[in-house]
Image (tube, rainbow, N blue to C red):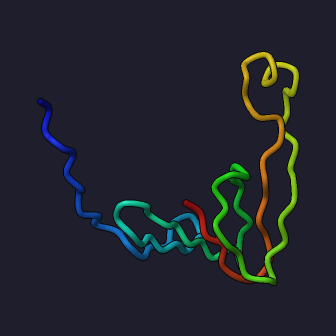
Amino acid sequence: MPSLPELMPTQVSDETFGGVTYHIAGELVPVLSVDVTRMPVYFEHHILLWKNSTITIGLKSLKGALKRMMAGMQIFVTEASGAGIVAFS
């Protein structure tokens, strides 16, 4: 019988990269909290956990819609912008 998977400890919890500050918390179900005050972030709609009331959520269309549809990829991505924090899982 195969052994059960072991949780790997995370080294990074709070970091700023590319002008975006983020925080990672949790082990079994990690949560990524992103400060979108300075720069909007794009994400798949089904991973949103919560957002501050000052965050605006909108859709952004991607180029090459026909090719993306034929490949089974998304045509739209969700954009979070404004002053505040948004969390993903």
Q: How many marks?
A: 0
| Whether residue 1 is situated above or below residue 82 in the rendered picture | above
In the image, taking residue 62 as reference, residue 34 lies left or right, namely: left
In the image, taking residue 42 as reference, residue 66 lies left or right, namely: right
- Name the outermost residue toward the front: 1
Residue shown at the point (71%, 69%) measured from the top left: 39
Quarter of the image with the N terminus in it: top left
Residue shown at the point (87%, 21%) measured from the top left: 66
Residue 61, by quadrant, is top right
In the image, taking residue 17 as reference, residue 64 lies left or right, namely: right
Quarter of the image with the C terminus in it: bottom right
Residue 63, by quadrant, is top right
| Whether residue 54 is situated above or below residue 75 in the rendered picture | below
Give the percent coordinates (x, y) of residue 60. 86, 49
**Of residues 7 and 42, which is closer to you in this image?**
7
| Whether residue 69 is situated above or below residue 27 in the rendered picture | above
**Of residues 16 and 8, which is closer to you in this image?**
8
**Of residues 7 and 69, which is closer to you in this image?**
7
Residue 21, by quadrant, is bottom right
- Name the outermost residue toward the top: 70
Give the percent coordinates (x, y) of residue 3. 13, 39
In the image, taking residue 12 as reference, residue 1 lies left or right, namely: left
Give the percent coordinates (x, y) of residue 28. 36, 60
Give the percent coordinates (x, y) of residue 27. 34, 64
